[in-house]
């Protein structure tokens, strides 16, 4: 009896782990398949999503986002930019302030930059950025472009849509040093957003 019970428990655990593995593989495949940029579209606003600082220095991921933001803003001089990110653990300034400094040091006029310094999640990035744009224009935000790393595109599109934004992705490479770590982390973040991040 005890042996049969142990076998049943092992089968249940084995089946559960198999389901988890399949679900994990499917989610990672979706992240990879949805990691590309949309066709480039000029929008009135571009949102650069925060990605952590080392003190006051942008992380590798954030640095890639900022470089892409500078390139877009130089190409479309009438576009404004929202830099979105609060201050996290180990950060001595807000991510928004660090991004502002990077953009201005690379020739972007400060008058084009809107600081969103409160967000602590991707959901809040879009929620607060939309609010900032609408306060400035007095009308619905509508179309925006956003910049983030490849691993983050799928969830960002989902959350932008939940915030009523017609959002176009600008995907930048994920640094090789953190590639595996970021895709693993994003799996759990995606599950959390599907369940919790409702507007």
Image (cartoon, helix red, strand yellow):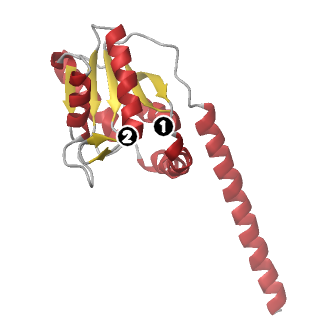
From the viewer's perspective, is 135 left or right of 51?
left
Q: Position of residue 137 (x, y in %)?
A: 20, 16
Q: Position of residue 63 (x, y in %)?
A: 37, 33
Can I make out residue 165 in this image?
no
Q: Quadrant of the N terminus?
A: bottom right
Q: Tell me the number on the disc at residue 25.
A: none
Rendered position, 5 above or below 91: below
Q: Position of residue 193 (x, y in %)?
A: 45, 46
Q: Regarding mark 1 in the picture, which secondary structure is present there?
A: helix
Q: Residue at x 69, y 56 (%)?
A: 21
Instruction: Classify residue 179 by image quadrant.
Output: top right
Instruction: Give the tally of numbered discs.
Output: 2
Q: Classify 10 Å Cα crowding around label 1: few (below 14), some (14-19), many (20 and above).
A: many
Rendered position, 156 above or below 17: above
Instruction: Between label 2 and label 1, give the one nearer the viewer.
Output: 1
Instruction: Classify residue 95 by image quadrant.
Output: top left
Q: Which residue is more in the foreground, 24 or 78?
A: 78
Rendered position, 41 above or below 65: above
Q: Residue at x 56, y 26 (%)?
A: 36
Can I make out residue 147 in this image?
yes
Q: Position of residue 75 (x, y in %)?
A: 36, 8
Please say if the residues under marks 2 and 1 sit with CB atoms less than 8 Å apart: yes
Q: Classify 10 Å Cα crowding around label 2: few (below 14), some (14-19), many (20 and above).
A: many
Q: Regarding mark 2 in the picture, which secondary structure is present there?
A: helix
Measured in 3D between alpha carbons, the distance from the residue under mark 2 to the one under mark 1, in whole angstroms, is: 9 Å
Q: Tell me the number on the disc at residue 152.
A: 1
Extreme-bottom residue of the structure: 1
Q: Which residue is mark 2?
A: 122
Q: Quadrant of the C terminus?
A: top left
From the viewer's perspective, is 124 left or right of 20?
left
Q: Residue at x 52, y 22 (%)?
A: 37
Of labels 2 and 1, earlier in sequence is: 2
């Amino acid at each position: 009896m005890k042996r049969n019970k142990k076998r049943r428990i092992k089968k249940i655990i084995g089946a559960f782990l198999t389901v988890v593995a399949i679900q994990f593989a499917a989610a990672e495949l979706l992240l990879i398949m949805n990691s590309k940029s949309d066709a480039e579209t000029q929008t009135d606003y571009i949102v650069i999503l925060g990605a952590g600082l080392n003190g006051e220095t942008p992380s590798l991921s954030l640095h890639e986002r900022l470089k892409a933001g500078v390139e877009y803003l130089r190409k479309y001089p009438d576009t404004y930019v929202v830099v979105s990110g609060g201050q996290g653990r180990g950060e001595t300034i807000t991510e928004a302030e660090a991004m502002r400094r990077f953009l201005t040091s690379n020739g972007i006029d400060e008058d084009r930059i809107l600081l969103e310094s409160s967000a602590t999640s991707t959901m809040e990035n879009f929620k607060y950025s939309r609010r900032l744009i609408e306060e400035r224009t007095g009308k619905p935000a509508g179309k925006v472009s956003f910049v983030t790393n490849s691993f983050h595109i799928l969830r960002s599109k989902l959350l932008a849509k939940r915030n009523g934004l017609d959002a176009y992705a600008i995907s930048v490479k994920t640094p090789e040093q953190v590639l595996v770590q970021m895709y693993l982390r994003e799996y759990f973040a995606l599950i959390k957003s599907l369940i919790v991040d409702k507007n």
